[in-house]
Image (cartoon, rainbow, N blue to C red):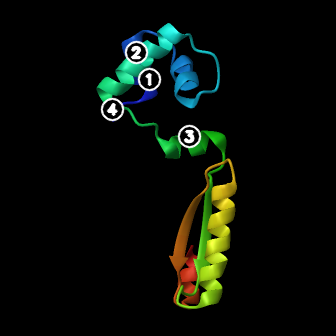
Amino acid sequence: MVTMRDIAKQVGISVSTVSRYVNRSGYVSAKTGARIQAVIDATQFVPNTIARDLSKGHTLNIGVIVPHLNHPYFSQLLAGIVAAAFESSHHYQIVLLQSNYDSGREMAT
């Protein structure tokens, strides 16, 4: 697995510059950006979302636990949650668990 540190080493720049480019969070010159992108393409680099979430201190996941989806109430509830999550500019992800009325399963998550 290729890391930002590996990309930085190959391009000859700092890890923070690679991070700014990958996260679009600061200025990186067009020339340097092109060099970084070339290494990203060559190595098929994919940012580690778990590491990103850890560094931010939060995730964009919404956990939903419902007894089942066979009842219109729960399907409409889930549809509303999904609609609100997708309307947001934050790109939330939905994690769904059907508990089948198993309280042990509900409490374990």
Q: Amino acid at mark 4?
A: Gln
Q: Quadrant of residue 24?
A: top right
Q: Earlier in the sequence, mark 4 or mark 1?
A: 1
Q: Is residue 45 left or right of residue 58?
A: left
Estimate the x, y position of residue 68 in percent, counting from the top left.
54, 87
* Residue under the point 41% across and 37% down: 46
Tag 3 residue = 52
State the separation of the CA atoms marked 2 and 1.
6 Å
Q: Give the quadrant of the N terminus.
A: top left
Tag 4 residue = 44
Mark 4 and mark 1 residues within 8 Å of each other at the beta carbon: no
Estimate the x, y position of residue 91 in percent, counting from the top left.
61, 50
Tag 1 residue = 5
Q: Earlier in the sequence, mark 2 or mark 3?
A: 2
State the separation of the CA atoms marked 4 and 1.
14 Å
Neighbour class for label 4 at 10 Å: few (<14), some, many (≥20)?
Answer: few
Q: Quadrant of residue 27?
A: top right
State the separation of the CA atoms marked 1 and 3.
14 Å
* Residue under the point 36% across and 14% down: 10
